[in-house]
């Protein structure tokens, strides 16, 4: 990570704590590694992101409904899903630095460096030639051809090692590629070992009678085991989807990069059930729908890209990520997977219950195929926070830190600020706030000079400030200050409700999708 990006990330993390977005969990006891609490502003931002996703899924699509499944599930669930036997990460330690890594990610990092070299070659060519044909250049440039050949070779070996579970082959690949520890530069590696990521606990009041159960590592299985319940009670017809927002838990080998990778996190998932043979059509459909959902927020279209999976999970026949340009570079934000009929078929086998759909058009029973969209809520939070964070120099030479959070997602939509704490201005400001608080989330503050209060609201991302002054008492008008432009305009108090609710409604974004 470049120094500039590192500094940005550090500033975002510090800002998140200072302004009540994210705190280290159990901080008074020196914290708990890779576990975080959301503060007063963070909780509001998180809830607004949930609303944006939930409305998109369940209100804009007549054939998608939502559920809320329990965190605890019968332990056989995880045997059927493959998590007991296959939910492992290949772990490797560096003997000199004592740091632990995922072996596959070290190899993928090597591949990323080769891809960066290709892009640099392409950029240099584009600067030299006015009429630049990228595809022709890539196919004829010797260095690029060599890089791509190496990428394909490494990908094939990684895929083979991951697919067969051959940890010795994975370590040998790390050795052959001369991959060094990013911290120490050492190549003194341990063997690669499999590490199961599920947290286990016991259910029961008597230890002898307790059953071993797991904290769910994903929310998807709660949807699959309820497939028939939802389909029958909702009279749903294929194709249809089931959406869910909920907590999941993974004992990550290396949990780092703030809230990007945590041991307790929240997912927003939708499983879309389709007729066998139509899954690829719907896979492409949801790729298009989901990227539009992201770009509609206005965080910058250049910050998104698709990344196809070369090493598919055991249940998938197609998979890709929507990656976002976080401060530490492009990383996975959302996964879109064609899961085939693996999940329902496996649960049918282990439960002994028939999990099939009767198609009235063909008079046939079949197990539906599934297309999944799965986004990490915490990663989405980080994407919004980091891309909204700006350090600006103003025309008068002063500086400000502002969070340019899209208005519908902002923790507070409007701050009500009496100019002074006397002359009846606080009372008038409270009257205005009481008229607005049922429609938009308001924040009231009367301490310090108005300029300082504006800066504080900029720092928490409040899109509008309403200043109540002496003129308000005379003609019932107030000043609205816009966060992004810092422009101010005089408006009647009676127009505030309509203006603010229209500007801050999540429906404004949804209508653009």
Image (cartoon, rainbow, N blue to C red):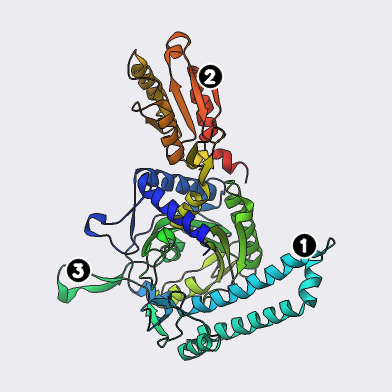
Mark drawn on residue 127: 1
**Which callout, 1 or 2, points at the residue further toward the start of the chain?**
1
Is residue 327 in view from this perspective?
no
Residue 465 or residue 354, whichever sits in front: 465
x and y percent of residue 29 in the render? 22, 58
Question: How far separated are the C-alphas under marks 1 and 2?
Answer: 51 Å
x and y percent of residue 113 in the render? 59, 73
In contact (CB < 8 Å): disc 3 and disc 1: no
Please name the residue that numbered disc 3 is placed on: 204
Q: Secondary structure at mark 2?
A: strand
User: To which quarter of the image does residue 108 belong?
Assistant: bottom right
**Which callout, 3 or 2, points at the residue further toward the start of the chain?**
3
Q: Residue at x 60, y 57 (%)?
A: 304
- Say if 50 sits above or below 108 in the image: above
x and y percent of residue 505 in the render? 52, 36
User: What is the residue that sits farthest to the top in this orientation?
Assistant: 474
Q: Residue at x 60, y 81 (%)?
A: 155
Relative to residue 282, is residue 54 drawn left or right?
left
Question: How far separated are the C-alphas under marks 3 and 2?
Answer: 62 Å
Q: Secondary structure at mark 3?
A: loop
Question: How far separated are the C-alphas under marks 3 and 1?
Answer: 68 Å
Mark drawn on residue 491: 2
User: What is the residue that sits farthest to the right in this orientation?
Assistant: 131
Label 2 neighbourhood size at 10 Å, few (<14), some (14-19), many (20+)? Answer: some
């Amino acid at each position: 990570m470049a120094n500039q990006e590192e500094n940005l990330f550090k500033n975002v993390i510090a800002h998140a704590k200072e302004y009540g977005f994210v705190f280290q969990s159990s901080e008074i006891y020196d914290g708990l590694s890779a576990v975080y609490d959301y503060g007063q502003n963070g909780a509001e931002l998180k809830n607004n992101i949930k609303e944006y996703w939930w409305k998109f899924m369940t209100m804009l699509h007549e054939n998608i409904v939502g559920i809320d499944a329990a965190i605890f599930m019968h332990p056989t669930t995880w045997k059927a899903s493959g998590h007991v036997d296959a939910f492992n990460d290949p772990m490797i330690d560096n003997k000199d630095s004592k740091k632990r890594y995922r072996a596959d990610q070290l190899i993928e990092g090597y591949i990323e460096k080769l891809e960066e070299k290709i892009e640099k070659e392409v950029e240099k060519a584009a600067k030299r030639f006015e009429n630049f044909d990228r595809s022709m250049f890539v196919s004829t440039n010797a260095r690029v051809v060599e890089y791509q050949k190496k990428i394909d070779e490494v990908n094939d070996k990684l895929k083979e090692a991951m697919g067969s579970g051959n940890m010795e082959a994975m370590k040998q690949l790390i050795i052959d590629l001369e991959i060094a520890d990013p911290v120490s530069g050492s190549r003194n590696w341990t063997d690669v070992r499999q590490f199961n990521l599920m947290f286990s606990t016991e259910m029961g009041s008597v230890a002898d009678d307790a059953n071993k159960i797991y904290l769910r590592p994903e929310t998807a299985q709660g949807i699959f085991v309820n497939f028939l319940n939802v389909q029958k009670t909702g009279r749903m017809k294929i194709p249809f989807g089931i959406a869910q927002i909920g907590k999941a838990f993974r004992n990550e080998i290396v949990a780092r990069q703030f809230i990007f990778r945590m041991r307790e996190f929240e997912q927003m998932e939708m499983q879309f059930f389709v007729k066998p043979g139509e899954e690829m059509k719907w896979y492409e459909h949801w790729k298009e729908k989901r990227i539009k959902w992201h770009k509609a927020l206005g965080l910058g279209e250049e910050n998104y890209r698709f990344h196809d999976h070369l090493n598919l999970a055991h249940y998938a026949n197609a998979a890709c990520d929507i990656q976002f340009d976080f401060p530490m570079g492009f990383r996975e934000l959302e996964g879109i997977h064609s899961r085939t009929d693996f999940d329902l078929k496996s649960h049918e086998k282990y439960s002994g219950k028939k999990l099939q759909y009767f198609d009235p058009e063909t008079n046939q029973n079949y197990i539906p195929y599934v297309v999944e969209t799965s986004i990490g809520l915490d990663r989405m939070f980080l994407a919004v926070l980091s891309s909204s964070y700006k350090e600006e120099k103003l025309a008068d030479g002063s500086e400000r830190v502002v969070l340019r959070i899209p208005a519908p997602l902002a923790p507070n939509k409007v701050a009500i600020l009496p100019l002074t704490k006397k002359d009846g201005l606080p009372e008038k400001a409270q009257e205005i706030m009481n008229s607005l608080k049922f429609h938009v989330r308001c924040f009231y503050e009367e301490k310090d000079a108005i300029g300082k209060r504006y800066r504080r609201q900029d720092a928490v991302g409040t899109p509008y400030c309403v200043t109540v002054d002496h003129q308000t008492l005379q003609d019932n008008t107030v000043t609205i200050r816009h966060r992004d432009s810092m422009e101010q305009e005089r408006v009647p108090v009676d127009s505030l409700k309509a203006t603010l609710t229209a500007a801050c409604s999540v429906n404004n974004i949804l209508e653009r999708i």
